[in-house]
Each structure stands twice: as structure tokens, then as C-alpha cells.
Amino acid sequence: MCGIIGTLGHADVAQDLLEGLKRLEYRGYDSAGIATLYNGSIERRRAEGKLINLGKVIEKEPLQGDIGIGHTRWATHGVPSERNAHPHATDRVAVVHNGIIENFRELRRELESSGRIFGTDTDTEVIVQLIHHNLSQGLKPVDATSAALERLEGAFALAILFAEEQELMIGARRGSPLCIGWGQKEMSLGSDALALAGLSNRISYLEDGDWAVITRDGATVRNTHGELVERAIRTTALSEKQMSKGNYPHFMAKEIHEQPTVIGQTLNTFFNPLDRSISLPELPFNLLEIERITLIACGTSFYAAMIAKYWFEQIARISVDIDIASEFRYRGTPMAKGGLALFISQSGETADTLAALRFCRKQGQHIAGIVNVSESTIDREADIVFNTHAGPEIGVASTKAFTCQLVTLACIVIATARVRGAISREQEQELSSAITEVPARAAEILNHDDSLRQLSNVLAGARDVLFIGRGASYPIALEGALKLKEISYIHAEGFAAGELKHGPIALIDQSVPVIVIAPSDALFEKTASNVSEVVARGAQVIFLSDSKGIAALGDQAKESIELPTVHSFVAPILYALPVQILAYHTAVLKGTDIDQPRNLAKSVTVE
Ligand code: F6R
């Protein structure tokens, strides 16, 4: 949420900042702005709406200078408008901020009573006014900032620019991520390595509480206690190419189509083709001693956790609790020491998931993560991380990260089941073989793109859409509904098929498409009865199943899509694809902003 960037570079820094903001726009896109220093004065351009609007403003009124900061916003305090857009500035200091200053009302009252005049509704402006106030008390920029940071409560990543200070930028982080890019006489700051991909591939990640004084020659970093610290510089492999849409009209389409490849890449880190076994990296705990697993995540990543619960309990015979991070973190759940808490996150920065992780650490849990963005906060804080290899996911709606999370979880389940003696060697080979089929079967499913696109006409005209499934297909029903609502804005709900009779069936009439996720597995007959019940009430059933399922039930459906016949263990991974594709084409028909749906942002770094 909100992307920030800063650079001490060469002339025309505004263009570099604009390019960096393009790479960060997935974090928020309701307004954007850039400030530079020109002849010692702070110059600003800001615009409401997408970055393209800021580009037009800068084209009309170019910004000069070789040092500057930029921001793309996801509004928390204050409506999206030019006035509330960052950078916020006085004539002495300019700030871009990602996060929320919780004590901003109190600070604002205090600063207003000492004569400072505020011009926006944002929490961020208190940072600017506080630093300005400190400067006018005679403090130098570094001391004025350090004193201001001590007063702030809440979460922030900041980049700060000072009038007349052509060689100085300050960055600070508490709660929200921030990294430094190192170059030759060029230094930069950004919310993540993606932002800096065009500027530097040598990155150091600030730790929580760090703040950095940056000049063209380098950076000095202090920790929360004011001690000088070293933060390792790492070389990232991220390239600008990975962040382009290629020949696809949207990132989401590209990311859906990358799945066979990235699932394969993720699987390769666990699968040993010689003996068809799954091996995990060395674990800092003994799987045999784990009595309970807690899986925590948000949104789509939570649905991956839901599916994993079915797998862990049925295959590895171990009890699993699952929870949404925003609920879990405040419940004060008592946890027996020595359990395993596993956090699933594409970004590795989701504020609630991170808070839940820290809570579990205090409860004496072993902390594991499944994370797509390496060097993200969860990646660094977990005791052990299983990285997914989905590559940068730019579309706000998660697709390839989800299926890679599932493949990773499936491998962890197999390894856990083996270690605990819950499966035989033959069963292990059977399950491992099933997973190795996934990339090829995923590619087959992508061939159904055309028929799914035609089906999306049915959904595009609907006011409400229901998705139903049982067992591990139930979370796919939830995921299908989430995908559809977030990018097409059509109201959609996912239900456990067996729950319909307990209330939701009242929603059904001829106008409601019901998408049934029903691979022919052990629960197929049960789902089939539920299909008959909704058909009897006039529902238009869209049936996603394999040849056997369609032969058994296809005549009841208005439309069917025949998916490959696969082992029921891996069916949820593969059935994620058609629901993603359906949502995608429906959104295309509705003409919505697919990669940047309204009100959303990728990487939810505020609670
Ligand atoms: C939905 C979606 C979100 C994320 C959620 C968690 O398409 O992308 O629901 O899954 O915000 O994000 P991560 O996985 O980054 O923690």
C-alpha cells in the first residue's frame, strides 16, 4: 500500500522517479506525486488518479533537479485528491510516506497550537510539520528528523528531502518496508527491490526501526537505538523485463499463462526425479515433535491455507488450525509451546500476517513462511522459509502466486506425512507423481481459454454469482468468488456445497449462475446431490469437472468445461486456473481495470 521512491541521481531525476513509480503502481494508484530540489528549492508536481495523470502534469510543467522523491498513494487518511497526494511539503522539507501515523491527531493539535498551519487531511503531514518545526528550532536536518521519528507512533516507511540540501536524503522504516539501492555516485530508496529495478541491482534492506542518512556516496544506517549498523548489500536478479506485460494485454493474463512454468520451477526445489521423492530444506525443528500446525494468511493466501488443512489432516494425519491473520492477531489465542506456525504470503509484507507471526513467536512457536518475495519482512523474520518461484506478481489479483503456494504446501504435506509415517513409500511416490503432472495439466487447462471466455458472457450479465464445492474444492469456490468480485465487481459468494440447504439456497433463481467445482473425487456424489437441488430451483449451473464427472452429471448443467482427469490430491491446484480465467474474461467484458481494480492495492502493508 503506497509505494515510495527516492533518488540522488543524475540530471532529470524526475524521469527516473516516474519510471520507478510505474513499477510501484501496483501498491496504490489513487494519486501520485514527485518532489525534486532545484537550485536548493523544493519543487512539487502532484495529480489525482493514476500515474499517467502525473506524467501529463510533468510533461506540461517539467521538474528539474538531480535529487527527488516520489509516491504512489493508496489513501488511508484523507480522500484521494491532489491536495492529499504526497509528497507533502513545506518550503524546507518534503516527505513521502507509506503507513499510518497513529498519533497524528495529538501531534497535529500540538503543532497547530505552536503556529504551524496544515494544508491537508492526511496523517503524513504531521511528519513534515514536525520536522519543519524542529528545523526552525535550530536543529540540523539529521537531528530534526531523528527527534521527529521519536515522536511518531504507528507504521511508516519515509523518504525525506530538505531544501538547500542537494546531497542529503533520509529514509526511515518502522513497520513498512524500505530498501536502499547502491550505485556509482547514485543512491536510491524504495519500498521494494522492484521499484529500484531500473536504478540498481545492489540492494540493502533496512530492518525495522532503522533510519538511513543517504548521500550520493553511500548511506549510513542507524538502528532504533541510534547505533550505527551495517546492512548487507545483496545483488538482486530482478530485471525490468520481468516486470513487463510482454504480448499480453494485462499482467493478470500473463501471470495466469505463466503458471505451468512457475509451478514447475517451484516444484523443482522439492522434487527429486531420481527416486520420485520430495525433500524439504533442513528444518530448524523436528517434524516428528510437532503436535499442532497453525496456518495463517490473508485473502487468497488464506484459501491456500484452507486447502492445506484438508491435505495435512487427511494425508499427514496432523491437526491443523487455520486463521485469517487480521482475526487471529487480536484474539490472544493460547498456543502450546513447540507448535509450528506457518505464514503464507505472496508479498511477505502483509501487515496482519506479520503481526500474527510476531505473536506466534512470543507464544514459543516454530515460525515458517511460504513467501514469494525474497528479502521481504516475513522472508527475513521466519525461522525457515519455503520460497515460491512465481516471479514478480504485478496484477493485483493473485493467480500464479496462489498455485505456487499450493504446490509448496503439497510438498510440505508429503514430506510431513512421510516423516510421521502416515504414508507408505508407494503412497509417497503416488502423490509425488501426481504433483509432477501439474505443470503439464495446467498447460492443458490454458487451452480451454476460448471456451471459458465464451462462458464469461453468462457471468458478465449476472448480478450475483455463486461458486460451490466440497472438501478441498470448497476453498476454490471461495477463491473463484473472490477473483470474480475483485476484478469484475460482480457480487459473488463461495459456499461449501453441503451448506447450501442451511440458508444460501434461498438466493437461487433463474438469474443466478452457480459454478460447481466438482472433480470426480470421493465427495463427487455428495456434490452431485447438491447440484440436483440447485437445478430443481432453476439455477443456471456451470459445471467444472473431468470426463467422468461430466458423463455422470453434465446433462444437468447449462454449460460444462471438461478439465483433465487428475489425482484428487492435486485437483484444487488445477481447478484454480479455470476460475481465474473466468474472472479474467468476465472483467474484460465488463471493461474494468483488471490489473488495478478500484479500491485495492497489492501488498497490504497497513492493517
Ligand atoms: C486477492 C489477493 C489478496 C491477497 C492478500 C494477501 O487476489 O491478492 O487477497 O492474497 O492481500 O496478500 P499476501 O499474500 O501478499 O500476504
Image: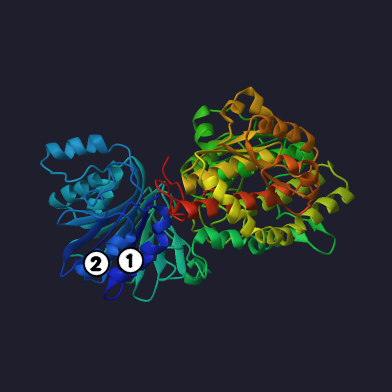
Determine the residue located farthest toward the top in the rendered image: 502
Residue located 62% across and 54% down the image: 452
Residue topped by disc 2:
58
Residue 60 position within the rendered picture, expressed as x and y whole percent measured from the top left: 20, 68
Q: Is residue 92 above or below residue 512?
A: below
In the rendered structure, find residue 18 and report the number of the disc placed on it: 1
C-alpha distance separating marks 1 and 2: 9 Å
Q: Position of residue 71 (x, y in %)?
A: 32, 57
Left or right? Give the position of 495 relative to 526: left
Instruction: Give whichever of 482, 539 is nearer the camera.
Output: 539
Tell me where residue 161 appears, x and y as whole percent. 24, 60
Q: What's under tag 2, amino acid-wise?
A: Ile
What is the crowding at mark 1: few (fewer than 14 residues within 10 Å), some, or many (at least 20)? many
Q: Estimate the x, y position of residue 19 in percent, counting from the top left.
A: 36, 68
Residue 62, picture quadrant: bottom left
Disc 1, disc 2: CB below 8 Å? yes
500 to the left or right of 223: right
Q: Nearer the viewer, mark 1 or mark 2?
A: 2
Vertical position of residue 122 compared to residue 230: above or below: above
Of 578 and 413, the residue lying toward us: 578
Q: Is residue 325 above or below residue 280?
A: above
Residue type highlighted by circle 1? Leu
| Mark 1 element type | helix
Q: Is residue 78 found left or right of 605 in the rendered image? A: left
In which quadrant of the rendered image does the C terminus lie?
Answer: top left
